Image (tube, rainbow, N blue to C red):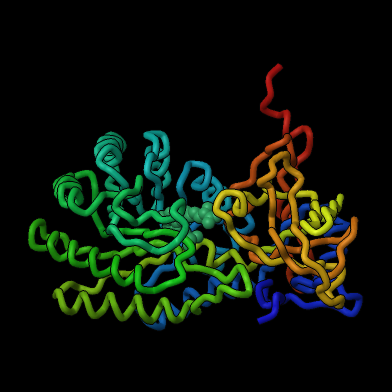
Amino acid sequence: MSKLSLFPLTTKANDAGHLVIGGCDSIELAAEFGTPLYIFDELSLRHKCAEFRDEFSRCYTDTKVVYACKAFISRTLATIFKEEGLGLDVVSAGEMSIAQSAHFPLDKVYFHGNNKSAEELQLALKWHIGRIVVDNFHELRMLDEIAKKQGAKPDILLRLSPGVDPHTHKYIATGVTDSKFGFFLSGAAEAVAQAMSSPNLNLVGLHFHIGSLIFEVEPYLQAIEIVLNFANDMKSRYRLEPRELNIGGGFAIQYTQDRPVSPVSVYAQAIATKVVSNCQKLGLALPGLVVEPGRAIIGQAGVALYEVGAIKDIPGIRRYVSVDGGMGDNIRPALYGAKYEAVVANKMRETEAREVTIAGKFCESGDILIKDITLPSVSAGDIIALPTCGAYCLPMASNYNASFKPAVVLVKEGKARLIRRRENLADLTSCDLV
Ligand code: LLP
């Protein structure tokens, strides 16, 4: 496969050898909006929303697709997800407020988190957030009291930690037993008992999220088996008949040429078959199915552009090509050893000639975006484009070294719309009291 297929669907190279995304020349975008610049292709984003919606509902009619905002959200994006009919998974008052200010239907919002504050829960009830995914006993008690006080009876799910290894980086494996998230299975029956006996809570189902960047289908199937067995046990003990089974997100995307992924249809087919067959075996009514993809919806739609500055040659050892961003806008390589591909966006017609290492500009030796990649000959002023930067780059960005968080543009049919301006000095000092 070619590197171009990692980019958004609308990507091509024009006659000038420039990378073109959504009908916009990336070199012109870099000149107009500056670098680092994050470009999102609207068509690719909508296409992925539709793919998840269609593939899952084809295999399992009662499926809801809920986009995990933590991968990246803004008010413009929330509007697109609203138009596409998705729900939103939020994990903070901040994400909830973005949804609210974009007039997103809040009954389609799922509120997650392992340490929600009383203020956040109060806000969630005030705004009639669709589901609160209760993570632990502390939250269960707190929510019970707040609901009673506010005269509300929220629909809740209980998050379980099914003890399944999703074979991903340990920082993003969440469904294992030794995890801060969710009720571990042997303690979860007590949570069901408490929720079922509360007049202030409406327990509608169960949730698990086993981790992120999961390339295999099997861990999902194992978790479904475990959680449905648990549901069956809860049915006989407490007459819980879950109306909803939320299996979280985690679906992998292809970041590099050597690590392909299965299409959404493969996950959908296997997951739907497993839910149906196990429910039939256990005599459980088929629950509504909820999936919460983040990365798989937005990852491929996003491209990061950087300008090349200093180049350092250490003969026989390495050629460092430094760019004007790095771990400030994309911490994933430094944090998880994440791998990316890159192209020289103004030299798309030149042949790849030489191995280089793309370094960021932050004051850390570990600020390397890509170690050892073969590119056309690179010089200062060239524009480097990294595909698959749509998820977990911008929301994890920092102001390290007092840097500015990048601008974001949304491209479609040759038009570019600035949906987040670059930060400036005034932003950096706005919270600073002298
Ligand atoms: N649902 C829940 C409850 C989650 O905690 C997450 C992600 C998702 C859904 C969406 O997962 P996705 O489909 O995007 O894999 N910063 C890391 C990823 C952390 C994921 C946290 N939870 C990274 O850059 O790889």
Image coords of residue 371 (percent x, y): 69, 59
Residue drawn at point x = 69 percent, y = 59 percent: 370
Image coords of residue 138 (percent x, y): 27, 37
Q: Is residue 423 positioned above or below 433 on the image?
A: below
Instruction: Identify which residue, 11 or 88, lies in the foreground.
Output: 11
Residue drawn at point x = 27 percent, y = 47 percent: 153
Residue drawn at point x = 56 percent, y = 73 percent: 259
Quadrant where the C terminus is found in the figure: top right
Residue 33 is drawn in which quadrant? bottom right
- Residue 70 visible in the displayed image: no
* Side of 378 where 243 appears, left or right: left
Image coords of residue 116 (percent x, y): 39, 40
Q: Residue furthest left?
A: 237
Residue drawn at point x = 47 percent, y = 68 percent: 251
Q: Is residue 42 positioned above or below 326 on the image?
A: below
Quadrant where the N terminus is found in the figure: bottom right
Instruction: Identify which residue, 379 or 281, lies in the foreground.
Output: 379
Q: Residue furthest front?
A: 316
* Side of 95 where 119 appears, left or right: left
Image coords of residue 307 (percent x, y): 83, 55
Residue 282 is drawn in which quadrant? bottom left
- Residue 415 visible in the displayed image: yes
How many discs appear?
A: 0
